[in-house]
Structures are given as structure tokens and as C-alpha cells.
Image: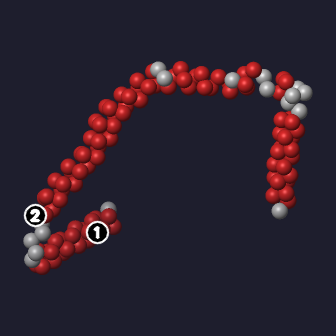
């Protein structure tokens, strides 16, 4: 509770100090130096970089990166899934004895793996 009161008091004090500084700024023009009036030159820097070399890089990424890398990865995964589905479809015979044989074979493989891990 004490920490909450201290934090609240500090934030209210900061708001009051800011209001007083803003209210008295006409009396003290040095409160905002020239570099702050221009926003530290961030706007000029962004305009110079985004309008020039970064735009060329962004255009290249939009064409090559998106079409080749992103779309290529998505289409590659789709191709792999389609091929796997085509191969797995051959295992769907509809006969119960085939499915029971597959389950039994899987259980034997798991049991053999567990025994090898225990005895190693």
C-alpha cells in the first residue's frame, strides 16, 4: 500500500511539475531549445532514409522477398503436405485387419524402443 501511495504521489507530482513548466514557458523561452522544436531532427532523418535507400530496399523485399521467400515457403509446405497425403492415402484400405496390423506393429516398435532404452 505504501509503494502504491508513493508511486501515485510521484506521478501526480510529475504532472504538476509539467503543467507548471508548460504554463511558465512564455516567461522562460529556453525551456524548449531549438533542437527540441525540430523534434531532434528525427523527421528529417526519417524522410532522408525512408524516401531514398530504404524505399528501394522495401520495394525489393516486397517483390523478391514476398514472392520468392514467403510465398515459396507457403507453397513448398503445401506441396509437401499434398505429396504426403497422396502417399498416406494408399494406406487407407478399409480393412480392419490392416489397421490392427499397423497398431500392433507400432506397439512392437514402441516396446522395442523402451526395452533398448532401459537395457542400455
Residue 4 occupies quadrant: bottom right
Where residue 25 appears, as percent x and y from the top left, is: 85, 30
Residue 43 occupies quadrant: top right
Above or below 99: residue 47: above
Where residue 95 appears, as percent x and y from the top left, is: 9, 77
Q: Disc 2 vs disc 1: which is toward the camera?
A: 2
Give the residue furthest to the front.
26
Pick the residue in front: 104 or 118.
104
Q: Quadrant of the C terminus?
A: bottom left
Where residue 100 appears, as percent x and y from the top left, is: 15, 77
Residue 85 seen in this snapshot: yes
Disc 2 target residue: 90
Above or below 45: residue 113: below
Give the residue furthest to the bottom.
96
Q: Secondary structure at mark 1?
A: helix
Binning the other alpha carbons within 10 Å of mark 2 as few (below 14), some (14 to 19) or many (20 upward) gives: few
Colour style of the rendered protein structure: secondary structure
Residue, x 73% and y 25% (percent of image)? 36
Binning the other alpha carbons within 10 Å of mark 1 as few (below 14), some (14 to 19) or many (20 upward) gives: few
Disc 1 target residue: 115
Pick the residue in front: 105 or 64.
64
Q: Secondary structure at mark 2?
A: loop
Q: Quadrant of the N terminus?
A: bottom right
Q: CA distance from mark 2 to mark 1?
A: 32 Å
46 relative position to 2: left or right:
left
- N-term mark: 2 or 1: 2
Checking the image for residue 94, the label placed there is none
Residue 19 occupies quadrant: top right
Amino acid at each position: 500500500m505504501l509503494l502504491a501511495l508513493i508511486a501515485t504521489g510521484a506521478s501526480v507530482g510529475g504532472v504538476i511539475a509539467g503543467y507548471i513548466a508548460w504554463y511558465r514557458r512564455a516567461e522562460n523561452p529556453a525551456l524548449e531549445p531549438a533542437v527540441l522544436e525540430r523534434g531532434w531532427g528525427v523527421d528529417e532523418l526519417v524522410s532522408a532514409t525512408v524516401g531514398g535507400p530504404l524505399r528501394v530496399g522495401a520495394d525489393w523485399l516486397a517483390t523478391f522477398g514476398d514472392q520468392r521467400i514467403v510465398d515459396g515457403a507457403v507453397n513448398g509446405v503445401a506441396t509437401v503436405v499434398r505429396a504426403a497425403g497422396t502417399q498416406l492415402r494408399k494406406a487407407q484400405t478399409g480393412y480392419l485387419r490392416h489397421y490392427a496390423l499397423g497398431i500392433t506393429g507400432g506397439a512392437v516398435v514402441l516396446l522395442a524402443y523402451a526395452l533398448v532404452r532401459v537395457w542400455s
